[in-house]
Image: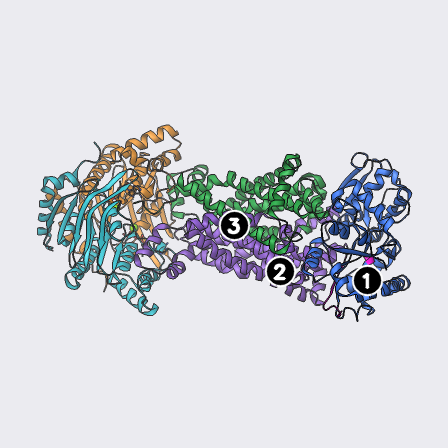
Chain colours: A blue, B orange, C cyan, D green, E purple
Amino acid sequence: SRPVESLEILGAPNAATIVLVRLLEAGGLDTAAPGATFRLWRDTDELRAGLVSGRSRLITTPTHVPANLANRGMPLRLLCILSMGHLSIVTADDGIRSFADLRGKPVVGFFRNDMPDLVFRAIAKREGIDPDRDIALTYVQTPMEAAQMLAAGRAATAILSEPPATAAIMMAQQQGRTLRRAVSLQEAWGRHFGQPRIPMAGVALHRSLIDDSPEILAALRAGLPGARDWVLADRKGAAALAEQRMQMRPAVFERSLDHLHIDVAPARAMKGELETFYKAILDLSPDALGGRLPDGAFYLDM
Amino acid sequence: MLRFEDVTLRYDDGPVLAGFDLAVAPGELVVLLGPSGCGKTSLLRLACGLAAPSSGRVVNGFGRTAVVFQEPRLLPWWPALDNVAFALAAQGVTRATARHRARALLDRFGFTDADTRKRPAALSGGMQSRVAIARALVVRPDLVLMDEPFAALDVGLRRDLQDLVRAAVTETGLAALFVTHDVTEAVRLADRLVVLSARPARIVHDERNQPRDEPAAMFRAAAALLDRPVVRAALLAPAAG
Amino acid sequence: MLRFEDVTLRYDDGPVLAGFDLAVAPGELVVLLGPSGCGKTSLLRLACGLAAPSSGRVVNGFGRTAVVFQEPRLLPWWPALDNVAFALAAQGVTRATARHRARALLDRFGFTDADTRKRPAALSGGMQSRVAIARALVVRPDLVLMDEPFAALDVGLRRDLQDLVRAAVTETGLAALFVTHDVTEAVRLADRLVVLSARPARIVHDERNQPRDEPAAMFRAAAALLDRPVVRAALLAPAAG
Amino acid sequence: MPMVVARGAWGLLGLAGLGLAWQLGHDALGPFVLPSPAETVERLWALIVTGQAGPALAVTGVNAIGGFLVGALLGAALGVTAGLLTPLGATLRPVLTVMLGVPPIAWVVLALLWFGPRGLAPAFTVSITVLPIVFSAAFQGILARDQKLSEMARVVGASPLLSFRMLLLPQLLDPLLPALATALAFSWKVGVMAEVLGGGTGIGGMIATERAHLDLAGTMAWILLVVALLLVCDGLLLAPMRRFLRTRRPAPAAG
Amino acid sequence: MPMVVARGAWGLLGLAGLGLAWQLGHDALGPFVLPSPAETVERLWALIVTGQAGPALAVTGVNAIGGFLVGALLGAALGVTAGLLTPLGATLRPVLTVMLGVPPIAWVVLALLWFGPRGLAPAFTVSITVLPIVFSAAFQGILARDQKLSEMARVVGASPLLSFRMLLLPQLLDPLLPALATALAFSWKVGVMAEVLGGGTGIGGMIATERAHLDLAGTMAWILLVVALLLVCDGLLLAPMRRFLRTRRPAPAAG
Ligand SMILES: Nc1ncnc2c1ncn2[C@@H]1O[C@H](COP(=O)(O)OP(=O)(O)OP(=O)(O)O)[C@@H](O)[C@H]1O
Ligand SMILES: Nc1ncnc2c1ncn2[C@@H]1O[C@H](COP(=O)(O)OP(=O)(O)OP(=O)(O)O)[C@@H](O)[C@H]1O
Ligand SMILES: [Mg+2]
Ligand SMILES: [Mg+2]
C-alpha cells in the first residue's frame, strides 16, 4: 500500500491531544503519511464534515463520540486512551469538601446532556443524590462561560474540565480570590465504578484509513508511548508546543498537566473500563451512545 | 383678515415673491390671476403656514382655514367618503356625524353612493378634484385657499361649484383666495381681481369686480381685462423669447 | 388609423363604455367633450393599450403613439430635462441628442435653463404639465392622446401650445384624440367635435368643426354648441338630482 | 378567493421543491450529512405523539413570539419617533447598527447574569435582534413618507394620532412588512440558537441534546418543527398586512 | 455640508452614549463580565500594531463582504424578478422564509463539505443569511412600486433596462436601504460566528482562541474591531444610497 497523501488530523480541543501533536511534530508519521497536517475541531459538525469527506480519518476525541458514530453506522475504531479524565468540581465555597457536600448547593454545569454532564449525573446517582432535586444545578453552554462566572464571583461552584479549571483558578488568584478543586470526579468515579479514572479521551481512526494504510496504525502504535513520555518529561517543551499548535496558554497548560491524567493505554486492554463507562452513560441516556455498546471490533490493540 | 406684509420668499434659485402686500377680508373673494410659475401656489403655501416667508410677515387672523391644493392629495388607502370625513375627524367631529356630513356634501357634488365608496385610484380625475374640494368645504371654513380648484371639472359642474362657493362668500361671510387661469371664471366670481406678473410675482393690476352671471357680460368683462396692456403683458406674453 | 369597434369596458361597478365606435384618421384632431366621470380617460387608456376592452376591438394602426396623462406622471428623482429625454431614450435616441432635443422643446415651452434642471417637486403645477406635454411631443408621434393637457396653463401658454399642436396636425399629419372641458378650446382646435353622455359614455353629438382663432367666432361657435339640447343635457346637467 | 388559493398552491409548490432538494441531498450525501426527510418526519411525529414537543414548544414559543412582539413594537415606535425627529434619528442609527452587529458572545454572559440561564435570556436575545431590524425599516419608512399628504394633514389640523392612523401607518406597512417577515424568521432562529448556546430548555435545549447525541434525524425533526411554526406564525401574524396591501394598493386599472 | 457634519456629530454622540453604558456596565459588574473600554481599546491597538489584526481581518473581510455582496445581488435580482412575476413570487416567498428561519446547524456540515472548513463556508453562511433579507425587501419594493409611473414607461416604450434604471431602481432604494443595513450588520456578525463555530480562521477563530483562554479583554478587542469595520462598511457602501435618497426626496418646499 502507498503512503496516505494529505491526511488532516483533527484534534479535540482537549489538552491530552498534545500527545498526538508531539508524535506528528517529532516526525513519527512522516513515512506513513507524509505532509499530514493537524487542526483542532471545536464542534462535532466539523468532525462529521471531516470524516464524511474523507479528509480527516485520524482524530482525537472524547471516547463516547466514536462509539456513538460507530453505532450509527460510521466505521470508526478506537485505538487508545489519551486521557484518564479531567473533570473536577471547582469552588469558592469552603463548605464543599466532598461530592456529598454538593447537596443543596448551586452548581453550574456545562454541555448539558453531553458526556461531562452524564458523568456527573452517574456519580450523583450512585451517591444517592438526584441532581435535579437535591442540587441547584444550572447550565451554561461551554466550560469557558462556567469558568468565567466562577472567576467573576458570579457563581460559587462549577463542574469544569481542563484546562478551563486551571484558568479559572489562576484568574481568580490574580483578583485575590481563592478557588480550589474540591472534588476530583475521577476519584469519585473510582469509589463507585472500580477504578479512580475515567477513560475519557482517545485516538480514533476511520476503518478505511486502516485498510488503506496499515503503516499508519503501525506508526501510531510505535510512536505514541514515546510521545507521551516526552510530554510528561519536558513540561515546558510540551507547553510551548501546545501554544504553537493548539493555541493554548503555556502557563495554564503547564499547570493543568497535573490534572489531565495523560496516558497512552490500548483500547483493547481498556475494554472493561470503557464498557463500564459506556454502560454508565447508557443507563442515563441510551441515545448518547446510539443505544448500545460498540461491538468487539471497535477496540483496537496497540 | 389674512394679510401679507412686505413678504419676500426665495428658493434656491432666487425670489418668487419680493416685497409683496395683500389683504383678504371676511366675506371677500379675491381671485389671483398670473402666468404659470409666477408664484401663486407659493403664495397660498405662505397663507396656510406650510411655508414661512424669507422676510416680512404673513398674518392669518381667520379661525378655520381650509385649502384646496393644486393636486387632489387624497389618501389612497381610504374611500372617497373617508377622505372627506378625515377633515371633520381632524376637527373632533364624531365618526357618525362626519360620515353623514361628508356623504351629504359628496351627494351635492354628483357622487352616487357607490362612488363615495371608491378609493381614489378608482375615481376619475374630476371626481378626485371634487373629493378634495369637498374635504376643504365640509368643515365650513372661515378662509378657503383654492388653487385652480375647478380646472378638471366639466362646464356644468364648474358652474355649480362656482355658485356654491360664491354663495358661501356672500351669505356666510367666507373669505376666499382663489387661483385660476380661467379669466371668465375670475370675472364671474371675484369681488376683487389681482393680476400677478411673471416670477417674481408683483401685483400688476388690482381691481374691484362685480360678480356677474350673464355670459355676454362675463365675456365683455374678461375681454376688457385682457385688453389692459399690463394684464396683456402678464398673461399673454409669448412663452419663449 | 385608430378605431374603436363596438367596444365595451366594464369596471366592478358596471360599464363605462358600451358598444362604442369611433375612428381617428391621420391629420385629424378629434376633441372629446363629456361630463366628469363619463369615461374619457378610460377611452384613452383603451386607445394606448393600457386597458383591454371587455368586448369589442380597439385597433391602433399608428406607428408611434404618445400620451399626455391627466396627471403629469413625472419621475420625481430626475430633473425636468431628463424626464423629457426619457421618452427619446426609450426610442433609442442617444443621450446627447435626446438632451439637446428635450432642451430645445422645453425652451419653446417657456423653461429657462435653470428650470430644466429642477426636479418635479421644485416645479409649479403648470410647469409639470408642460414637462409632461413635452415628453409626449418630443418624440414626434404619429398619434397623440391628450387628457386635458392644458388645464393647468395660463391663457398665453395655453394659446401657444394649442397653436403648436394644431400646427403639427395640419402640417405633419399628426393625429390627435384630445380631451378637454373647455368648450372654447374645443372649437378653436377641433377638426371634429365629439360630445359624450354621462357614464356609460355614448356619443350624443358628433360634428365636423372648422378650427378658428378670432375670439368672437370662437365664442359664437361655443355658444352654438352648448345651445344644442343634447349637448346641453350632457354638459350642463345639474350635478345632483 | 381563487387568487388566494392559487397563491397558496404556488407556495406549496415552492416548499415541495425544497423537500425534493432535501431528499436529493440526502441521497447524494448520506445520513451523516443530511438525514432523510421521511425519517425526520417520522421522528417529528413521534415527538408530537409522545408529548415531548408540547412543553418544549411552549417554552420556545414564548421566547420567540414574546421576544418578537416586544422587539417589533419597541423598534417600530423608536423608528417612527427617530424618523420624525432628525437629531434623534442621526443619534440612534449607528447605535442600532452596532446593536445588530455585535456578536452575541459579547453579551451572552451579561444576559445570563441578568436573566438567569433558564429565564428570559433567549427572549432578550430575540428582542435585541428584532428591535434594530424593525427600527431601521420604520425609520426609513417615515423618511420616505409622502410629504404632500403630511402637509395636507397638517393643514386640515389632524392630530398626530389621527395622522398616524390614516396616513403614516398605511405608508409604513410596505416597508415594515419585509422587515417583520425577516425579524419573525430570525426570532425563531435566534431564540432556538440562544437556547442551544445558553444551555436553556425549550426546543433549543432539545436540539442541543440531540446534537450531543449526534442524533441527526432528531435534530432535524426539531428544526422541522421550528420551521413549521415559523410558517404558521408568518401566516397568522403577517398575512393580514399582506392582504391589506394587496387590496388597497392602486392596482393597474381593471378591464 | 453643515447638515452632514451635524448628522455625523449626532451619530458620534450616540456611539459615545454606547461607550458610556459600557463603562458603567464595567464599573458595576467587574472585568470578568465586561472588560473596561480603556483596556479593550489598548488591546485592540496592540492587535493592530503587532500585525495580528491584519491577516485575520483579511480573511473575515472576504467572508463578510464577499458573502454580503453575493447574497445582496442575488437577493435583489431574485426579489425584483419575483415581484414582477406573481407566481414566481408566490413560490419563492415561503422558500426564502424557510431559508431565513432554518438555524445554520441544519446545514453547517453541508457547507463545510462543499466549501471546506477554512474555505468559503463562512461566506456561504453569510450569503444564505443576506439573500432572503434582501429578497424580501426587493420583492415588497417592487409590489409597492408606483403603477402610474410604470404605465407611463410602458406607453413611452421604455425597455425593461431603461425602466429599471430610471424608475424601478430609485423606488427600490427606499425599501432596500434598511434591508441592506440589516444585512450588512448580519454579514459581520454571522461571518464571525460561523468562524467561531466552524473552526475557521479569521477574526472568529481569534475570538474562539481568546475565549478558550478566558481572555475577555482580548475577545472584546476583536469584537470592537468587527464593529468598527461594520460601521466603516456601512459608511462606505450605504452612505451613497442615503445621500441619494436625502437629496432626491421631494422635501417640504424651502422658505
Ligand atoms: N380602476 C377603476 N375601477 C373602478 N372604476 C373605475 C376605475 N377607473 C375609473 N373608474 C370609474 O369609471 C368612470 C369613468 O372614469 P374616467 O376616469 O374614464 O372618467 P373621465 O371621463 O376621464 O372623467 P374626468 O373628466 O373626471 O377625468 C368613473 O365612474 C370612475 O369611477
Ligand atoms: N420647492 C421649490 N424649490 C425651488 N423652487 C421652487 C420650489 N417650489 C416652487 N419653485 C419655483 O417657484 C416658482 C413658482 O412656483 P409656484 O408653484 O408658486 O407657481 P404657480 O404660480 O403656482 O404656477 P402654476 O400656475 O404653474 O401652478 C417656479 O419657478 C418654481 O419652479
Ligand atoms: Mg400652482
Ligand atoms: Mg379623466
| Label 2 crowd bin: few (<14), some (14–19), many (20+), radius 10 Å | some
- Residue E87 in the image: x percent, y percent? 43, 49
- Which three-letter amino acid code belongs to the residue tagged 1? Leu
- Which three-letter amino acid code belongs to the residue tagged 3? Gly
In space, the residues marked 2 and 1 are separated at their CA atoms by 28 Å
In space, the residues marked 3 and 1 are separated at their CA atoms by 46 Å
| Left or right of B3 on screen, residue E14 | right
**Which element is circle 2 on?**
helix
Locate the C terminus of chain D by quadrant: top left
Q: Which residue is mark 2?
A: E114
| Label 3 crowd bin: few (<14), some (14–19), many (20+), radius 10 Å | some
Query: Magenta span covers which residues?
Result: A1-16
Q: Which residue is mark 1?
A: A20
- Which three-letter amino acid code belongs to the residue tagged 2? Trp
Label annotation for residue C20: none
In space, the residues marked 3 and 2 are separated at their CA atoms by 21 Å
